[in-house]
Amino acid sequence: MKISQKLSQLLALSCALVVTVPLALKAEDKATAATETVSKKVQYLFVHNAKDVSFADGKMTLKGIDANTVFFSDRPDRIAGQITTADFTKNWGNGADSFEADNPNATIAIFSEEEPTDIVVELSNPVLAEDSLTYDIKVLEGEIPKATGECSLFIDIIGRPLTPVSYAGVARRTARRVVRYR
């Protein structure tokens, strides 16, 4: 009788494990999925447009800058919108993964009459004064042109500097392949 009683207990324990372990694993999978969803961050590309740009002493000044900065994300989120340039510069250092914590790369596309030019730079320390926005820059690729003009500054996604899928990474691969449509 003792053997049959122990076998019954063992059988009951085995059945309990067969039922509860998969339930526990499913709950753990759900918790992992929820954590991944919460920790997923949408990554944005930001674009400044200006009437002119100048370079001096390691600084770049966007003159006649638009009052709004455009932002958008890639798939699957496909979010687009605008933020005031003033709010953009005020929020430069907010958050653990801010632009201040990890200086972004950017491509400045200059649409001069002589020759369109793209330069890849690292940005830091934005200062907005009226309709001019000045950044400290470090040139990563390209040369500062003599002639300037209207421009767009494409600021790379936070946390993805110099990667092949980042805007600056693509710009490096396509440097000197500038096409101007008239």
Image: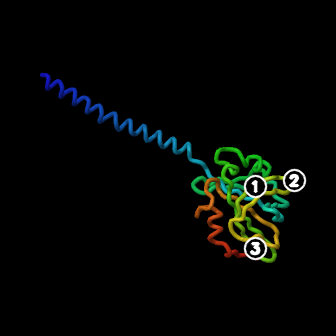
Q: Position of residue 126 (x, y in %)?
A: 78, 53
Pair 1/2: label in front:
2
What is the secondary structure assignment of the residue under circle 3?
A: loop
Look at the picture and state if 91 lies above or below 141.
above
Q: Which residue is mark 1?
A: 69
19 relative position to 171: left or right: left
Q: Which residue is mark 2?
A: 130
Sequence-first disc among 2 and 3: 3
Look at the picture and state if 171 lies above or below 156.
below
Coloring scheme used: rainbow
28 relative position to 49: left or right: left
- Direction left: furthest residue: 1
**Which of 96/25 is in front?**
96
Amino acid under label 1? Thr
- Direction front: furthest residue: 57
Residue 93 seen by the camera: yes
Crowd tier of the residue under label 2, counting other residues whose Cα lies within 10 Å: few below 14, some 14–19, many 20 or above: few
Q: Looking at the image, which residue is at 68% across and 68% down?
A: 141
Q: Looking at the image, which residue is at 70% across and 74% down?
A: 178
Q: Looking at the image, which residue is at 74% across and 55% down?
A: 124
Look at the picture and state if 71 lies above or below 35.
below
Separation (CA) of disc 1 from disc 2 = 15 Å
Q: Which mark is residue 116?
A: 3
**Which of 118/16 is in front?**
118
Amino acid under label 2? Glu
What is the secondary structure assignment of the residue under circle 2?
A: loop
**Which of 180/138 is in front?**
138
